[in-house]
Image (cartoon, helix red, strand yellow):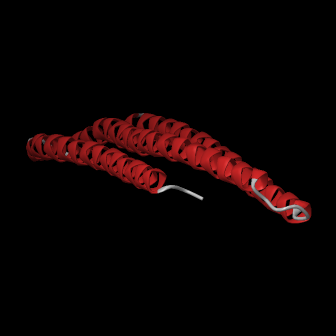
Amino acid sequence: MMTAEQIVAAQKSNVETLFGLTQKAFDGVEKLVELNLQVAKSGFAEAAEHAKAALSVKDAQELLALQASMLQPAAEKAAAYSRYLYEIATSTNAEVTKIAESQLADTQQKLMAAVDSAVKNAPAGSENAVALVKSAVAAANNALESVTKAAKQAADVAEANFNAINTTAAKATQAATKRARG
């Protein structure tokens, strides 16, 4: 049985964890807003430069050359934006996961302590019920570990796919730029 002090301490810990998770989420959103502001500012300046350059071309061949010269830098910037966006998401996710796993480990430890305490105070003849409770807690812990491992593996696969897509896109852009210039 938990005492009033233990309940208050657990609630305080949960509130602190909630605020920590909220702060991490806000940090991620703040980074995302900063990134988008930078992209918007540079995009506006580049659009003005490109418009001036397009207005100064003298013939269709010069216009094609201008477009080709803009293709690869634009694709590289898009890939860099995607990479940075992915980094923000993964770092925020990693920080939130770290906090959640820490909280989960603490909760599991407290649950096992409560089960052990209950087992010590269990009346005679309740060994089967005690074994059942311990088995259920162990099964829940194993299931949770399996889900956590699967989530980490999925994140690793997603990262590998993201890197492969970026590499393929960069190669395709380089090839298209060479064809446009050639």
Establish if 69 lies above or below 8: above
Quick one: which residue is furthest to the front in this view?
124
Q: Quadrant of the C terminus?
A: top left
Name the residue rendered at 38%, 41% in the picture: 88
Q: Is residue 175 left or right of residue 1?
A: left
Q: In which quarter of the image is the N terminus?
A: bottom right
Q: Residue 108, how many percent across, how many down?
A: 63, 49
Name the residue rendered at 82%, 62% in the picture: 123
Corner quadrant of residue 109: top right
Q: Is residue 43 visible?
A: yes
Q: Is residue 167 left or right of residue 149?
A: left
Q: In this view, does 19 lie to the left or right of 138?
A: left
Name the residue rendered at 60%, 48% in the picture: 110
Name the residue rendered at 91%, 64% in the picture: 125
Q: Which of the two residues, 2 or 28, is positioned nearer the viewer here?
A: 2
Q: Residue 44, how many percent across, how many down?
A: 13, 47
Q: Residue 81, how many percent across, how many down?
A: 35, 42
Q: Which of the two residues, 72 or 33, is positioned nearer the viewer here?
A: 33
Q: Which of the two residues, 56 or 149, is positioned nearer the viewer here?
A: 149
Q: Residue 14, how many percent across, how many down?
A: 42, 53
Q: Which of the two residues, 85 or 22, is positioned nearer the viewer here?
A: 22
Q: How many marks?
A: 0
Q: Can residue 161 be seen in this view?
A: no
